[in-house]
Image (cartoon, rainbow, N blue to C red):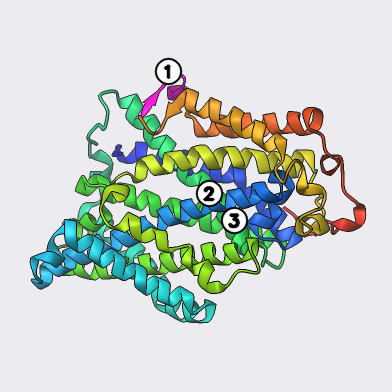
Amino acid sequence: MLLSAKEAIASILFGNALPFLLIAPIILLFARYGVDTFIGFRSALGYLGSNIFYFIFMFLTIGYMSVAFFMAGEALVKIASVAGLPEFFTNGITGAPFFAIIVFAIVFFITFQGPLVMRKFNLIGVPAILLVTLGLVALLMVGQGWEKIFSLPAPESYDDHARSMITALEINIGLGFSWLPYLGQYSRLAKSEKSAFKAGFFSYGIIVNVAVILGALAALVVASLDPTDWMFAIGGTWVGVIGLLLLTLGNITAGTFLMYSQAISFKTVFPKKSWTLAMGTAIPTVLLLLSASFYDAFGSFITVISYIMAIFGGIVISDFFFVKKQKVSIRDLYDTNGSYYYWKGINPSAIVSFIVGTIVYWSLYNPVLDTSSSLFYYMSAGIPAYFAAGICYYVSAKYLFSYEADRGVRTESFPSKSNDAV
């Protein structure tokens, strides 16, 4: 979705940053109680409900991994073309899937070894990501100049300019909400609530927004949404080759983070299962690497994720801050027969809220058919779904399905608030 530079920056800052700010407070749950995402969310979703949410997270992570690996595959295809390799490797139809699966295998091997090997690889991978970012900034500033970039017109994706703008905004909203299940991965290890919140805000708020803005500007200059096209078009052949090698390393690094997050979360939800089985949950990613179909449909994928994560975001924020009033029982979070069992392991208030949020979202926007109502132009779909689900959850938990867990927990079951609370 190509917009002018000013419109792209506005849609990213509002679309990506606002949803993140709406879900970021849940970081306090993980930091205060030292629990993972899928343990902490049991208070709102129930034990079975939280397990179901894990499989939604797994689907999301597999999608993100497939995009990262296929992008690396396309980058290696372009490098293979420069190197003069046989057509099998330089043809996007055969070469990109081949290289993408090779990249998947490399990431799988690194991640399977555990965090110590990952840490050593990150000594190379993280600087690669930094160099790609800085290199892109330098190429845009020196090669193009900000004045030229901000004067470039953008090709319209729709006949209606307003539709192009709001659809781009919705895609960014989806990206912002999509970080919800990842917030507990490292926040639970933070020394204080304040440091956990700052780290999450810096990582998913500032860094992600900067990277997305740079990508949007590069896409505008090159008139292509494919990051592998940017390096050659802006920097020339050899700068392009170096840039694509660094991009590949960066995607491998991102892939190890995503794959490890998925595997360690599986072990959290199913602690008796083996590490091999936990890693095996990443194997379905290969199916999405066999062609460019999923890679090309990433925009539709992220809008579906926006719908799901916006609703869950509204539910968990409403539960922790307004229903439970930041007091949950650690004992009951881990006791799967405890007070968060609700109805057959699922919280009815969460079910009702998900249905209401679904009706609101799909009434405003259909991400599969890419059709919308007139109200979509004024309020998007993800943010209204978030508030609808949150308000519905509060009313339901307080007045319709009011369980003992919703009316308060034993005072000895929760720690006192830290002085570092945000």
Q: Percent from the top left, x then y, of residue 406? A: 82, 40
Left of 38 or right of it: where is 144? left
Label 2 sits on residue: 56
Give me the residue at 25% from left, 31% from top.
156
Can residue 19 be seen in this snapshot? yes
Asked which secondary structure carries label 2, the reply is helix
- Say which amino acid is labelled 1: Ser
Q: Is residue 268 above or below residue 116?
A: above
In the rendered image, which quarter contains the N terminus? Answer: top left
Identity, as a three-letter code, of the amino acid under mark 2: Ile
Residue 183: give its label.
3
Residue type (three-letter) at the residue carrying disc 3: Leu
Residue 136 visible in the snapshot: no
Number of the label disc, if any, that sits on residue 374: 1
Q: Residue at x 10, y 71 (%)?
A: 85
Task: Judge by depth and name the residue closer to the eye, 61 or 124.
Answer: 61
Pointer 3 or 1: first along the chain: 3
